[in-house]
Amino acid sequence: MHVPFLNLKAAYHEIKSEFDAAYRRVMESGWYILGEELSAFEEEFARYCGVKHCVGVGNGLEALHLVLRAWGIGAGDEVIVPANTYIATWLAVTYAGARPVPVEPDEKTYNLDPEKVEAAINNKTKAIIAVHLYGQPADMDAIVNVAKHYNLKVLEDAAQAQGAVYKGRYTGSLGDAAGFSFYPGKNLGAYGDAGAVTTNDPMLAEKVRCLRNYGSKVKYINEYQGCNSRLDELQAAFLRVKLTHLDEWNRRRRSLAEVYLHNLQDQDLDLPYIPSWAEPVWHLFVVRSRSRNELQKSLKNNNIDTLIHYPIPPHLSGAYTALGFKTGDFPITEQLANEVLSLPMGPHQDVDMTHFVIHAISDYAKGGSTIGLHQLS
Ligand SMILES: *Cc1c(COP(=O)(O)O)cnc(C)c1O
């Protein structure tokens, strides 16, 4: 058996006729950028998240970046970011010209630790970006409280968390604004690049709408130095199809997560921790192991694909040498980078595959990982 990390083609096949109809509808419309499909998707996704406004943009990085720009955040400003995140969160800040100020995660949830945020605030701080890493909502009430006290904006990086719920409210509605990515591998994924901003603030929505399209509201009247970051009609039409299946596909992820959680309890692994207020959507199912690299190799020998999210934290990556960070500056983040392993997870992974992964992990723990090695030789 081969267990792929994520089977994207199966998603296409499950609802092929709906995609085909959406494709034909757009092609026959003769209108391919900023049209009815996008407006409809924006309305539907805003309603899904429980917010007043959604603005489709080119990708998740630009969703985050355009919000920061619309808030007037740039050179000389600081933005608090998780040390433990995908580098795009930091790139949104530096792309706007501001400085990312990393804060360590909570050791159990791996998300931004609200108690450590306050210590990182100074008079240059303008905003906090909270990431819902792996599809697990961050502790937003605590983060928003700190932000209110210091008059800071809160931006959710919800790229990995479409449909995740925090205390009964959907991600995307928990801060002043949120940035979503619809990269194909995300829980709600397009068939190319796409992203969106959600917010209840009509002024912010209007400014982002303007910035995504050359800084122009009315054709050839350019109020700002905007950029070209639009969600095209084909992707919007595909996303509308997928949105109607998101809850069901997230439910399937949840039931696989339950199988993993139930059957991996006795292994020498740290399993994901779920706070009582969180309903995660399992974008990734991430375990921690002191012998992560050996475990990954052993699973590979059993034809099981795994990934590491993420092997090099942003502060140690080549992109940010100029910020002057060094190994040891963010020890929790660095330890996570050495120990985390993402197991196969997705709405089209069946229970047999999941049990095959569980067996391979327990075989490895018993020293039985040579089964796979024999097959190789
Ligand atoms: C995927 C991702 C992004 C960036 O999204 P793109 O659409 O690839 O630009 C940002 N933040 C996080 C946490 C992500 O996982």
Image (cartoon, rainbow, N blue to C red):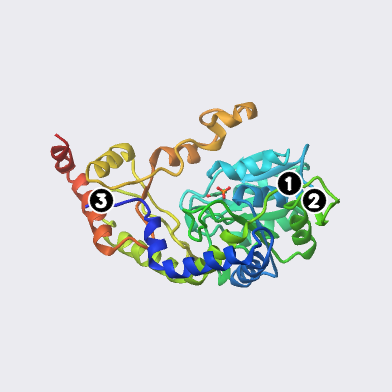
The image position of residue 82, as x and y in percent, is 58, 45
Task: Read off the residue under disc 3.
Answer: 2
Res. 82 visible in picture? no
159 relative to 299, above or below:
below
- On residue 215, which mark appears? 2
Amino acid at the residue labelled 2: Gly
296 relative to 211, above or below:
above
Secondary structure of the residue carrying numbered label 1: loop
The image position of residue 287, as x and y in percent, is 37, 50
Residue at 64% over, 68% down: 46
Crowd tier of the residue under label 3, counting other residues whose Cα lies within 10 Å: few below 14, some 14–19, many 20 or above: few
The answer to whether 217 appears left or right of 189 in the picture is right
Question: Disc 2 vs disc 1: Cβ atoms closer than 8 Å?
Answer: yes
Residue at 30% over, 63% down: 259
Residue nearer the viewer, 18 or 241: 18
105 relative to 349, above or below:
above
Amino acid at the residue labelled 1: Cys
Secondary structure of the residue carrying numbered label 3: loop
Residue nearer the viewer, 345 or 35: 35
Secondary structure of the residue carrying numbered label 2: loop
Amino acid at the residue labelled 3: His
Q: Quadrant of the C terminus?
A: top left
Cα–Cα span, label 2 and label 3: 48 Å
Cα–Cα span, label 3 and label 1: 43 Å
The image position of residue 130, as x and y in percent, is 61, 53
The image position of residue 14, as x and y in percent, is 38, 67
Res. 15 visible in picture? yes
Residue nearer the viewer, 142 or 208: 208
Task: Read off the residue under disc 1.
Answer: 227
40 relative to 128, above or below:
below
Where on the picture, by quarter, is residue 314?
top right
